[in-house]
Image (cartoon, rainbow, N blue to C red):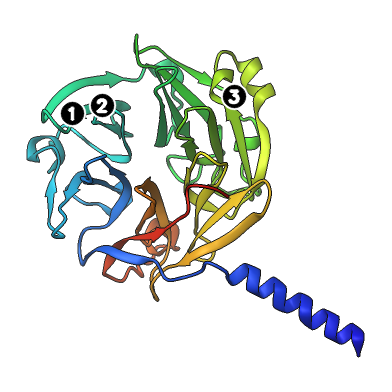
């Protein structure tokens, strides 16, 4: 009898711990047609989203108004139609100078636009020697401390090739780029046919890069100072914590890494002390949380149902509007 009671108490504690903090994420944007991929939010609260090329939208980047409106950004010439200057983009970020960095994965270049002056800052073309035939440049981070852009190249751009993932490291000062840590074990999927290096994040102090394979259950990190050579980088990469299969991550100053849990369609957090736990669920019927952004104590996530698209769903389109952006309150002051 005592043994049964002990087991019951253990289960109650376990379930309570796992459920603590779980709540349904708040919808902040909803649309029958606009299907956000990644997200970037400025210090003043302006919200920008990319539209995943798999969706087939004629609009590449949108600004979302506080009233729920949306418009092509920075303008129609850059971001609307088959002849727009931006061709296909998933990865977008904003730096401390309010420059919006847009990674064009088809033209293999960055479009850098200042959102205050509403002017083009520059276009940076990536050199061919750092690319592969199946390069898939879906996300990146800005390391302002070292004046670098670090791109996660998953490869597998055709969705079927064997992975040859790597970091592409772009020097912002001279626009030179190198390919680093190619096929490092930390970047590879857990099984054949799985997707490789995908989620990537940098902490607010520009000290650590966190990353992993989309189809990998381990999260890794490496110090930004180690991006000086392949040898230093490979030696510096260490296993950090567990994670779910995920498409996006974000991190705070305290080693908490927030995860778009695409297996269970929830938002999770992980670190090297408590492991992985759920912090918010998606509204009923919603799937595939994708891009994450932390701003003013909230974790924002796009939710784009990628798993229901024909390319990832055996040729069937089971998408169901509305398509949403959600947020949930997080504690970024301590663990």
Q: Are marks 1 and 2 in contact (CB under 8 Å)?
A: yes
Earlier in the chain: of badge 1 and badge 3, it is: 1
Front-most of 202 and 243?
A: 202
* Callout 2: SS: loop
Q: Residue at x 40, y 76 (%)?
A: 284
| Element type where label 1 sits in the image | strand
Q: Is residue 335 left or right of residue 76?
A: right
Distance from disc 1 to disc 3, alpha carbons, whole Å, reads 32 Å
Residue 270: give x, y in percent of width and height. Answer: 59, 51
Above or below, comparing residue 28 to residue 13 in the picture? above
Q: Position of residue 197 (x, y in %)?
A: 54, 39
Left or right of 307, for residue 7: right
Instruction: Write down the residue under mark 2.
Output: 97
Residue that label 3 marks: 181
> Is tag 2's residue or tag 3's residue first in the polypeptide sequence?
2
Image quadrant in which you'd find residue 134? top left
According to the image, label 1 marks what residue? 114
Q: Are marks 2 and 3 in contact (CB under 8 Å)?
A: no
On-image quarter of the N terminus = bottom right
Whole-number angstrom distance, CA of label 2 to CA of label 3? 30 Å
Name the mark nearer the viewer: 1 or 2.
2
**Residue 178 marker:** none
Residue 253 picture location, percent across and down: 51, 39
User: Viewer-nearest of labels 1 and 3?
Assistant: 1
Counting from the top left corner in percent of width and height, residue 200 is at 49, 38
**x 14%, y 31%: residue:** 116
User: 101 or 154: which is nearer to us?
Assistant: 101
Q: Quadrant of residue 7?
A: bottom right
Give the secondary structure at mark 3: loop
Mark 2: few, some, or many residues within 10 Å (few <14, many ≥20)? few
């Amino acid at each position: 009898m005592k043994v049964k009671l002990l087991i019951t108490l253990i289960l109650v504690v376990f379930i309570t711990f796992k459920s603590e903090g779980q709540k349904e994420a708040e919808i902040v944007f909803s649309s029958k047609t606009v299907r956000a991929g990644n997200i970037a939010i400025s210090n003043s609260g302006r919200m920008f989203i990319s539209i995943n090329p798999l969706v087939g939208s004629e609009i590449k980047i949108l600004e979302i108004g506080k009233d729920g409106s949306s418009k092509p950004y920075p303008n129609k010439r850059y971001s609307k139609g088959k002849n727009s200057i931006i061709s296909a983009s998933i990865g977008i970020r904003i730096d401390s100078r309010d420059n919006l960095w847009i990674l064009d994965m088809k033209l293999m270049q960055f479009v850098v636009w200042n959102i205050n002056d509403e002017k083009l800052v520059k276009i940076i073309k990536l050199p061919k020697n750092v690319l592969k035939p199946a390069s898939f440049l879906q996300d990146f981070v800005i390391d302002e401390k070292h004046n670098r852009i670090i791109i996660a190249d998953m490869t597998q751009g055709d969705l079927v090739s064997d992975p040859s993932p790597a970091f592409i490291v772009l020097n912002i000062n001279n626009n030179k780029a190198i390919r680093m840590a190619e096929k490092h074990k930390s970047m590879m999927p857990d099984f054949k046919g799985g997707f490789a290096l995908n989620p990537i994040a940098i902490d607010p102090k520009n000290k650590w890069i966190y990353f992993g394979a989309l189809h990998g259950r381990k999260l890794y990190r490496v110090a930004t100072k180690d991006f000086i050579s392949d040898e230093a980088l490979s030696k510096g990469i260490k296993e950090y914590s567990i994670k779910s299969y995920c498409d996006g991550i974000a991190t705070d100053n305290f080693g908490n890494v927030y995860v778009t849990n695409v297996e269970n369609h929830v938002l999770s957090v992980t670190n090297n002390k408590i492991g992985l736990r759920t912090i918010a669920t998606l509204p009923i019927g919603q799937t595939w949380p994708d891009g994450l952004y932390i701003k003013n104590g909230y974790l924002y996530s796009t939710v784009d149902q990628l798993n229901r698209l024909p390319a990832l769903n055996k040729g069937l389109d089971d998408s169901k509007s509305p398509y949403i952006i959600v947020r949930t309150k997080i504690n970024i002051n301590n663990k």
